[in-house]
C-alpha cells in the first residue's frame, strides 16, 4: 500500500502514536495518583475515626449512676503511642479485668450505644449521610453488635488476626474500606466507608480527562497533519518540478517560497542545478544550431559553384565527375545539417509544437505517395492498411516521423521487398506501424537503433544516402508529442517500428 | 533584367553572380548592408537578393529602409531558418525567403517568379500574337518555330513584353538590361531593338521618338 510508505503518513502515524502514549501515560498516572490519594486519605480518615470511636466507647458520656470506672481503664491518648500489650494477657492498667469490664460495658451500654463523638463525626454516621460512613461494634465476642444506621447488614466480623493490636487494621471489601480495632477481647470497633461515591466521582473525572485527551489528540493530529503537510510541501513541489523536467520541460523550476527550512534549501540547490542543467543543454543545442548555421554558408558556396560548373559542359569527363562528387557530398552535408538542426531544435525544446487534430491515415497516404518513387527504384512494394485514425499533434513534424520511418524501411530492405504501413485508432491515441521484411536488426544492435549516428551496417547505409539521424529524429519528435517509438526485429524476418501518439 | 545581390561571402557572391549572368541577367553586387541599401535605393532593380547577416547593416535594416522608398521585389537569403525568422522576414516586406544552402535551379526559379510577380505577369509564358516567350526555358517561338535570339536581345524583348502596353524609356531599358560593370553605350539598345525587329517582325516594337519603346 502506498499510504504506508508515504513519509507523510509514517510521520503522522508515529506522531499520533507518541502523542497518544504520552497522553495515556499522563492520564493513567494522574488517575492512579488521584485514586491512591483518595484511598490513602480515606484510610487515614478511617484510622482516625476508628481511634476516636474506640475512645468514645471506652469513654462514653457517663449515664447517670454509672461509675466512671472506665476512665481508669485504657488510656485516652492515641493507642499508637502505647506499647503494644502482650496478646491475651490482661493489661495491668485494666484493674477490673475483662469480665468486670464486659459486665460493666454490658451493663452500662444500652442497645443504642450513646457514644460521645465529635459532632461532625456524629453527623457523618447519621442516617442518610452522603459520605456513607458507618461503624459496627462487636461486643462480647459478637454477642452484641451495634451498628450505625448506614452500616450494611453483611459486614463480616473481622477475624482475630492481630488481637488487641492497638493500631487500626485496614481491610477492603469491594468499594468499602474498613478499619477495625480490637479494643478488648471479643470487642471490635469497625469503621467503614464506601468509596463508591468517590470512585464514581473519580470515574467521572477520568472520563473528562479521557475526553480532553481525545480532543487534544485530535487537535494534535490535525495540527500534525497540517505541519507535516506544510513541511513536506517542498518535496511535493520538488517532485512535480522534477517530473516536468524529466518530461522535457527544462525551464521548469521548483520556485519554493519557503527558503529557510532544510527542504527549502534543498529546493534552492536543486533549482540552481536545474538552471545549470538547462543552461548546459541550451548551450549544447545552441552550439549544434550555430555550428549547423555556420556550415550552411560555406556549403552554399560549394553547392553554387559545383552546380554552376555542372550547368555548362566541362572540359574533361574527370572534371565533370569531380564536380558531381562534390555536389553529392554537399547534398549529403546539407541533409546532415538539416537533421542536426532538427535535433538541436527538439533538444532545446525551444520549438513549440503547433498542434492540430488531423487524420493520421491521410498523412500516411500522402507520405507513401511522396516516397513511392524511392520504393519503385528498389522494386519495393508498399502495402497500406490505413484505418481512419484521429491524431493530435504537429502535422508537419508527424509527417517527418512517417517519412523517416518509411525511408528507413525502404532503405533497409531487400530489392523487391515489402513494406507494410498501418494506422490503428485506439482508446489511448493513434498508433502507426511500419514494418518491412528486410534483413532485420541484430539483437545487439536493437537497443542502439535510435542512437544518433548509429549505423547497423556502415557500408550499406552510407551508400543509401542516409546520415544516421532519421530514426533519432523520429524518436525525438514522437517523444516531444508525449508518445513512444519502439522497434522490434527478428533478424532475417524484417523489423517493425511502432509509434504511439497519445490523444 | 537587372538584379542586385547583397552578400558578404565573396565566394558565394561570385557563384550566384555567375549563375545569374549565365541566365542573362545583369547583376550588380554589394558586399555589405550600407552599399546594398545605397544601390537598391538608387537603381530600379527587377529583384534584390539580400543576405540577412551582413556587415555594417543587417538584412532586416536594409529591407526596412528600402521599403520606405521602393517596392523592388526582395528575396532574402539566410542561414537562419527558424519559422519566426521567416515570419519576420516576410512581415518586414520580403517577397520570398530562401535558406542556405540552396540549389541553384531553385534560386533561379524563385527569381523568375519574383520578377514575373513584380511586373504583374503571373504566367511564365507571354504570348503576343504568334510570338510566345517561355521564360522558364528562355526561348522565343514565332508560330511554333523557335527564333534564335542573343542573350541581350532576349532580355530586352522579355522586358518589353513584360511591360506590354506600357512605354519603356531607353534609360529604363538601359538600367534593367545593363549592369554596373557594363560600359556599353546606350545606343547599343537601338541596335538590339533593330535586330529584334528583323527576327520577330517590324511592327512588334514601336518607337516613340524621344520617349522610348513600346510593345502593343
Image (cartoon, helix red, strand yellow):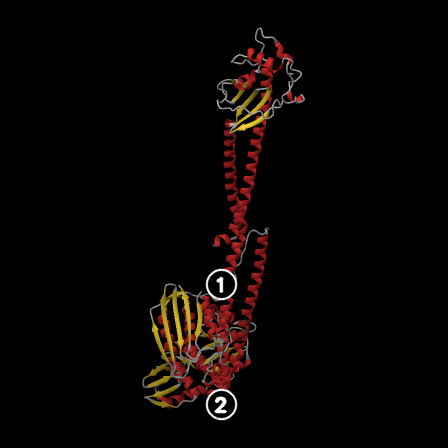
Image vertical order of residue A345 relative to residue B20, above or below: above
Image vertical order of residue A100 relative to residue B216, above or below: above
- Residue furthest bottom as drawn: A316
Disc 1 is placed on an element classified as: loop
Q: Which mark is residue A63?
A: none
Q: Quadrant of residue A101?
A: top right
Q: Label 2: which residue?
A: A320
Q: Label 1: which residue?
A: A247
Please, which chain is the residue tagged with disc 2 on?
A
Please, which chain is the residue tagged with disc 1 on?
A
Mark 1 or 2, which is nearer the eye?
A: 1
- Structural crowding at the residue carrying mark 1, measured as other residues with C-alpha within 10 Å and reported as few (<14), some (14–19) or many (≥20): few
Q: Quadrant of residue A90?
A: top right
Position in image of residue A268 (x %, y %)? 58, 56
Image vertical order of residue A293 relative to residue A304, above or below: above
Q: Nearer the viewer, residue B216 or B31?
A: B31
Q: Is residue B177 visible?
A: yes
Circles 1 and 2 in contact, beta carbons < 8 Å: no
Number of numbered tags placed on the structure image: 2
Image vertical order of residue B74 relative to residue B21, above or below: above
Q: Nearer the viewer, residue A107 or B165?
A: A107
**Seen in the image, is A86 located left or right of residue B157?**
right
Where does the N terminus of chain B fall, quadrant-wise? bottom left
Disc 2 is placed on an element classified as: helix
Q: Nearer the viewer, residue A469 or A19?
A: A19
Position in image of residue A110 (x %, y %)? 53, 12
Where does the C terminus of chain B fall, quadrant-wise? bottom left
Position in image of residue A129 (x %, y %)? 50, 20
The residue under the point 49% across, 87% down is: A324
**Seen in the image, is A429 located left or right of residue A85?**
left
Position in image of residue A275 (x %, y %)? 56, 61
Amino acid at each position: 500500500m502506498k499510504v504506508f510508505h508515504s513519509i507523510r503518513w509514517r510521520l503522522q502515524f508515529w506522531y499520533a502514536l507518541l502523542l497518544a502514549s504520552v497522553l495515556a501515560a499522563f492520564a493513567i498516572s494522574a488517575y492512579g495518583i488521584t485514586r491512591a490519594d483518595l484511598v490513602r486519605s480515606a484510610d487515614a480518615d478511617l484510622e482516625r475515626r476508628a481511634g476516636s470511636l474506640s475512645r468514645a466507647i471506652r469513654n462514653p458520656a457517663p449515664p447517670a449512676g454509672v461509675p466512671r470506672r472506665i476512665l481508669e481503664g485504657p488510656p485516652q491518648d492515641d493507642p499508637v503511642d502505647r506499647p503494644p500489650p502482650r496478646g491475651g494477657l490482661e493489661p495491668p492498667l485494666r484493674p477490673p479485668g475483662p469480665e468486670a469490664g464486659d459486665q460493666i460495658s454490658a451493663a452500662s451500654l444500652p442497645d443504642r450505644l450513646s457514644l460521645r463523638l465529635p459532632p461532625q463525626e456524629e453527623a457523618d454516621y447519621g442516617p442518610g449521610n452522603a459520605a456513607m460512613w458507618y461503624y459496627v461494634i462487636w461486643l462480647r465476642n459478637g454477642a452484641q453488635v451495634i451498628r450505625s444506621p448506614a452500616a450494611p447488614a453483611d459486614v463480616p466480623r473481622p477475624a482475630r488476626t492481630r488481637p488487641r493490636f492497638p493500631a487500626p487494621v485496614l481491610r477492603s471489601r469491594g468499594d468499602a474500606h474498613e478499619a477495625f480495632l480490637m479494643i478488648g477481647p471479643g470487642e471490635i470497633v469497625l469503621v467503614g466507608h464506601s468509596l463508591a461515591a468517590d470512585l464514581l466521582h473519580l470515574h467521572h473525572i477520568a472520563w473528562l480527562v479521557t475526553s480532553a485527551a481525545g480532543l487534544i489528540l485530535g487537535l494534535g493530529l490535525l495540527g500534525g497533519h497540517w505541519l507535516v503537510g506544510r513541511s513536506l510541501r517542498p518535496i511535493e513541489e520538488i517532485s512535480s518540478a522534477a517530473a516536468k523536467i524529466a518530461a522535457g520541460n527544462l525551464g521548469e523550476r521548483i520556485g519554493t517560497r519557503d527558503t529557510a527550512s532544510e527542504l527549502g534549501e534543498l529546493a534552492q540547490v536543486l533549482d540552481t542545478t536545474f538552471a545549470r542543467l538547462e543552461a548546459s543543454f541550451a548551450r549544447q543545442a545552441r552550439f549544434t544550431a550555430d555550428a549547423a548555421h555556420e556550415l550552411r554558408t560555406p556549403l552554399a558556396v560549394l553547392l553554387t559553384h559545383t552546380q554552376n560548373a555542372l550547368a555548362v559542359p566541362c572540359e574533361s569527363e574527370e572534371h565533370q565527375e569531380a564536380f558531381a562528387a562534390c555536389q553529392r557530398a554537399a547534398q549529403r552535408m546539407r541533409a546532415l545539417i538539416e537533421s542536426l538542426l532538427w535535433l538541436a531544435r527538439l533538444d532545446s525544446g525551444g520549438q513549440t509544437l503547433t498542434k492540430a487534430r488531423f487524420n493520421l491515415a491521410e498523412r500516411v497516404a500522402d507520405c507513401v505517395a511522396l516516397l513511392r518513387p524511392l520504393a519503385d527504384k528498389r522494386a519495393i512494394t508498399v502495402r497500406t492498411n490505413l484505418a481512419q485514425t484521429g491524431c493530435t499533434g504537429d502535422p508537419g513534424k508527424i509527417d517527418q516521423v512517417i517519412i523517416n520511418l518509411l525511408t528507413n524501411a525502404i532503405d533497409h530492405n531487400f530489392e523487391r521487398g515489402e513494406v507494410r504501413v498501418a494506422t490503428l485508432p485506439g482508446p489511448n491515441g493513434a498508433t502507426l506501424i511500419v514494418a518491412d521484411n528486410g534483413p532485420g536488426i541484430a539483437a545487439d544492435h536493437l537497443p542502439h537503433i535510435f542512437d544518433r549516428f548509429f549505423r547497423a551496417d556502415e557500408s550499406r547505409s552510407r551508400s543509401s544516402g542516409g546520415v544516421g539521424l532519421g530514426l533519432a529524429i523520429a524518436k525525438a519528435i514522437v517523444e516531444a508529442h508525449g508518445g513512444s517509438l519502439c522497434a522490434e526485429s527478428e533478424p532475417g524476418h524484417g523489423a517493425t517500428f511502432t509509434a504511439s501518439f497519445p490523444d | 533584367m537587372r538584379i542586385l545581390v547583397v552578400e558578404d561571402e565573396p565566394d558565394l557572391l561570385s557563384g550566384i553572380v555567375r549563375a545569374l549572368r549565365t541566365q542573362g541577367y545583369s547583376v550588380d553586387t554589394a558586399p555589405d548592408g550600407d552599399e546594398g541599401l545605397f544601390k537598391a535605393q538608387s537603381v530600379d532593380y527587377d529583384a534584390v537578393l539580400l543576405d540577412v547577416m551582413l556587415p555594417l547593416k543587417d538584412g532586416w535594416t536594409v529591407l526596412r529602409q528600402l521599403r520606405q522608398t521602393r517596392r523592388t521585389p526582395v528575396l532574402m537569403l539566410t542561414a537562419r531558418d527558424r519559422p519566426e525568422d521567416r515570419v519576420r522576414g516576410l512581415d518586414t516586406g520580403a517577397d520570398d525567403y530562401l535558406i542556405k544552402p540552396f540549389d541553384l535551379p531553385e534560386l533561379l526559379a524563385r527569381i523568375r517568379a519574383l520578377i514575373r510577380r513584380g511586373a504583374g505577369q503571373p504566367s511564365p509564358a507571354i504570348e503576343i500574337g504568334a510570338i510566345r516567350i517561355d521564360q522558364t526555358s528562355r526561348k522565343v517561338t514565332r508560330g511554333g518555330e523557335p527564333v534564335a535570339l542573343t542573350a541581350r536581345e532576349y532580355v530586352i524583348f522579355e522586358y518589353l513584353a513584360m511591360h506590354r502596353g506600357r512605354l519603356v524609356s531607353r534609360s529604363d531599358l538601359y538600367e534593367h538590361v545593363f549592369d554596373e560593370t557594363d560600359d556599353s553605350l546606350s545606343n547599343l539598345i537601338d541596335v538590339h531593338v533593330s535586330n529584334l525587329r528583323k527576327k520577330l517582325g517590324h511592327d512588334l516594337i514601336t518607337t516613340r521618338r524621344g520617349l522610348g519603346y513600346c510593345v502593343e
